Amino acid sequence: MPGVWGRVAAAGVVVGAVFVVAAPAGAQETSVPEVTDVEVETLCTPTEPGLVELSGLAADDGRMYAIGDSGADQTVWVLGENCAVTGTLDVPVDSYDVEDLALHDGTLWLSDTGDNDRRRETIALTSMDATSGEGGLHRLTYPDTAQDAEALLVGVDGRPVIVTKTLLGESGVYVSDVPVTDLPSPGPSPLRRAGAIRVGPTDTPGGPVPSAGSTLVTGGAVSVDGRVVALRTYTDAYLYAAPDGDVVAALTGSTPIRIPLPNEPQGEAIAFTGAGDLLSASESTAAAPAPIRIVRGATDLVSLPDSSDNVSVAIQVEPAAVVAVGVVLVAGAAGATWWIVRRRRS
């Protein structure tokens, strides 16, 4: 099976259980308002085979930029609004595992941050001119230990923010105090840990594993004006208000709203259009790419301190009992063992 979850095996009958635990210091609670009256529409479906494992997405001026997961991450595909391929850009360096894509001031930034075994000494951002594809390598280092990460956020100040992918517990928020335009090549440049967040679990259907997939951060995006920050899991999107454009403050100091993105097989990509619509894309479990979907007017759903015309939406707050919970899969009385095997590059 292509994608992140190649195989999940457990002894006995596996059932999901939820345990209430104390939230670690600095980790955001998981109880967030849910937008219940939003429509997730199909925008279009790519036909390019290289996007079967679509992992990163960015948008600008009627164009979409898309890239596949490890093994299919040496080309950025330029798509029109109908998902037809209008061009290609060759990645200028040999990537290890590209997991996300951001667009900042006409430059694409590829998040080469995948590390399932958590053993990389450095991760990297790859810069690419959105027209010519020219660019270079910019290595980064974590301040603590190796991490697996699939979400890259570049705010209006140009500082790259990386959010890690953690099955149980908190996801780390790491930031460079050097804007992307000033990152040395090849580096490395240091990251610092700026905080932590928790998302999920939710009951939104979809993803490779029920419930557990809703706790894993798989992508991120920042609106064009920098005032709304989005993270996604396999099943849901979380939108944070960033009125001053500070991505780290938005993630670690505010409560998001949650938009369910149901029934995506392995949702890993998210992006904002210039109009404030939210694009969502998934790796496919079939031979053809999965549809790219859209939530129109998504940025209008987020209340900003100086906004006068916020859209009124119906919300439903998740029960307090799920605040700061961990999802533990149990196999019978003896417990369960998980094997998560991911397809590797040859």
Image (cartoon, helix red, strand yellow):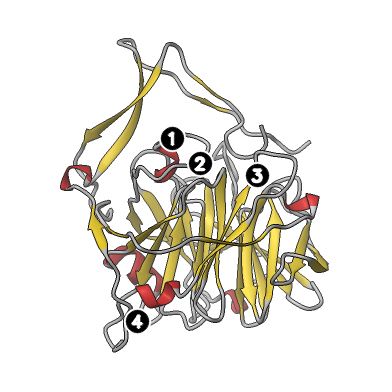
Q: Amino acid at mark 4?
A: Pro
Query: Which residue position holds label 2?
Result: 207
Query: Which residue position holds label 1?
Result: 210
Between marks 3 and 4 in the image, the one whose residue lies nearer the viewer: 3
Query: Which residue position holds label 3?
Result: 284
Residue visible at 48% across and 83% down in the picture:
225
Between marks 2 and 4 in the image, the one whose residue lies nearer the viewer: 2
Going from the N terminus, do you reach mark 2 or mark 4 first?
2
Residue 135 vertical position relative to residue 207 in the rendered view, above or below: below
Q: Amino acid at mark 3?
A: Ser
Q: Is residue 279 left or right of residue 299?
A: right
Q: Is residue 283 left or right of residue 256?
A: right
Name the element at disc 3: loop
Residue visible at 76% across and 63% down in the picture:
77
Q: Amino acid at mark 2?
A: Gly
Going from the N terminus, do you reach mark 3 or mark 4 first?
4
Name the element at disc 1: loop
Query: Which residue position holds label 4?
Result: 243
Q: CA distance from mark 3 to mark 2?
A: 10 Å
- Give whichever of 107, 262 is nearer the camera: 262
